[in-house]
Amino acid sequence: MDLLGRLIRGAEARSTSGLANPADWLINAFSGASTNSGERVTIKNAIGLMTVFAVVADISETIGGLPLKVYRILDEVKIEATDHRAWRMLHDKPNPLMNARLFWSVVASNRCLWGNAFIELERSDGISVDTLWPLDPARVTVEWNEARKMKRFRYVEQSGEERVLAEEDVLHILDLSTDGVIGMSRIATCREGIGKALARDRFEGAFHRRGGTVRGVVEHPGKVKNSRPLRESWNEIYGGSANANQVAVLEEGATFKTVQMPLQDMQFVESAKLSATEIAVLFNAPPSRYGGSTGDSLTYATVEGNAIQWATQTVAPVATAIQEALEHDPAIFPFNAWWPEFDMKGLMRGDSKARVEYYTGLSAVDAIHPLEIRDEEGLGSWPDGETPPWEQEPAPIEGGDVTNGIVDPATAAAVVNGAVA
């Protein structure tokens, strides 16, 4: 068969990553790649690091807690399109087993850990997508046909059965990518930093397992032909934190000399801060949120600034990647008149004083209506049967002139000073 025939038939399809023909990042994720620290880094042992787990859980749970709404433009005003067929699927229940909070949390965690999130699009009527299912990235192979510029996906079920899914049946959400076909796992790509954190964690655990002290040397006046029984019996009796600080009884003139290292030289606290800082930076998160070093002292202003930084620099990119992938998928939104968007207003709220000043400034130039302020603050519409303040007639002040709601300044001053009853 000639080259043209092979291209037309897709014979030149290239397996980018997966179980059958995995790329480097996938090999590293499963078997682990050795690092300079001696640790093998995998997705599984990396998520065992407290800071990695905390950062990924924080991001994914925050994304899951954001309402995903559908919007449209009506009369040049952005409104919620609650009547759109995708509203309930995206906002409430993507599939019969998962609510929206759990589903989008899974999608966000897959993107953070693997650099790729895969969503299977299901059509009950064969036309419109009405159900979304997350796919385990560890079981997905992405194949790229260079000639046709098309993807297809191979998915291995837990039973071992393999399914081939067309590009229109899978929504692929990528992290940073160099080819636009497959995303790069931050853990696998930056495995040296994760390896150092694993080595620090393992070293500290071994230190505490030995009772929190550096072991010493047992000296014997005679010749010891086999030191292994002596060493093993010593570790069995006096080793571990449970046996720490016991009184040692030595026989046959043996003596024990400790080889001490000052605890301050261990720098466990500083090592933990360094690991937390490096991992937080890897996921573009504020280090101080996870016990890392910030380089300066935290004040109320910086704490509030970190909260906004967390929302804009850590959560927003993940949320944007998900909503843009949904928006540009013609199987979900075939027309450009509607689009999905995570509601992040709750994360961007400043303190009460800052919000009052913000709303006051907008009201001064008639840029916002009081009902819009109530909506932003979650207060709802004005109670039925009550007249809103902006619609009430100004009350006359006895002894003063009121014209169009403006009180004579002299009268107003007299009222304030108690001169007019």
Image (cartoon, rainbow, N blue to C red):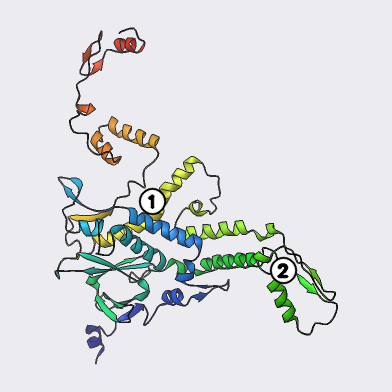
Rendered image quadrant of residue 359? top left
Q: Within 10 angstroms of label 1, few (less than 14), some, or many (20 or more) residues?
A: some
Which numbered dot is residue 228? none
Which corner quadrant of the image does residue 57 belong to? bottom left
Q: Secondary structure at mark 1?
A: helix
Nearer to the camera, 51 or 330: 51
User: Is 353 displayed left or right of 268 in the figure?
Assistant: left
Q: Is residue 28 among what the camera can see? A: yes
Pointer 1 residue: 312
Quick one: 84 or 230, which is closer to the camera? Answer: 230
Dot 2: element = loop
Is 309 located above or below residue 377 in the figure? below
Which residue is the site of mark 2? 215
The mark tally for this picture is: 2
Q: State the image coordinates of residue 62 (x, y, percent, origin top left).
A: 37, 54
Would you say 112 lies left or right of 131 here?
Answer: right
Tell which residue pokes out farthest to the bottom in this image.
1
Q: Nearer the viewer, residue 320 or 56?
A: 56
Task: Give how far across and how far down residue 61 sits, in percent.
Answer: 38, 57
Lower sequence index among marks 2 and 1: 2
Q: Residues within 10 Å of mark 2 (few under 14, many from 20)?
A: some
Number of the front mark, 2 or 1: 2
- Locate the C terminus by quadrant: top left
* Position above or below: 413 against 36: above
Of the residues shown, which amino acid type is indicated by label 2? Arg
Residue drawn at x 35%, y 77% is 16
Quadrant in the picture for the N terminus? bottom left
Q: CA distance from mark 2 to mark 1?
A: 49 Å
The residue sitting at 33% across, 63% down in the picture is 107
Indicate the position of residue 292 as horizontal and vertical percent values.
53, 54
Amino acid type at image mark 1: Thr
Of residues 99 and 78, the one drawn nearer to the viewer in this rendering: 99
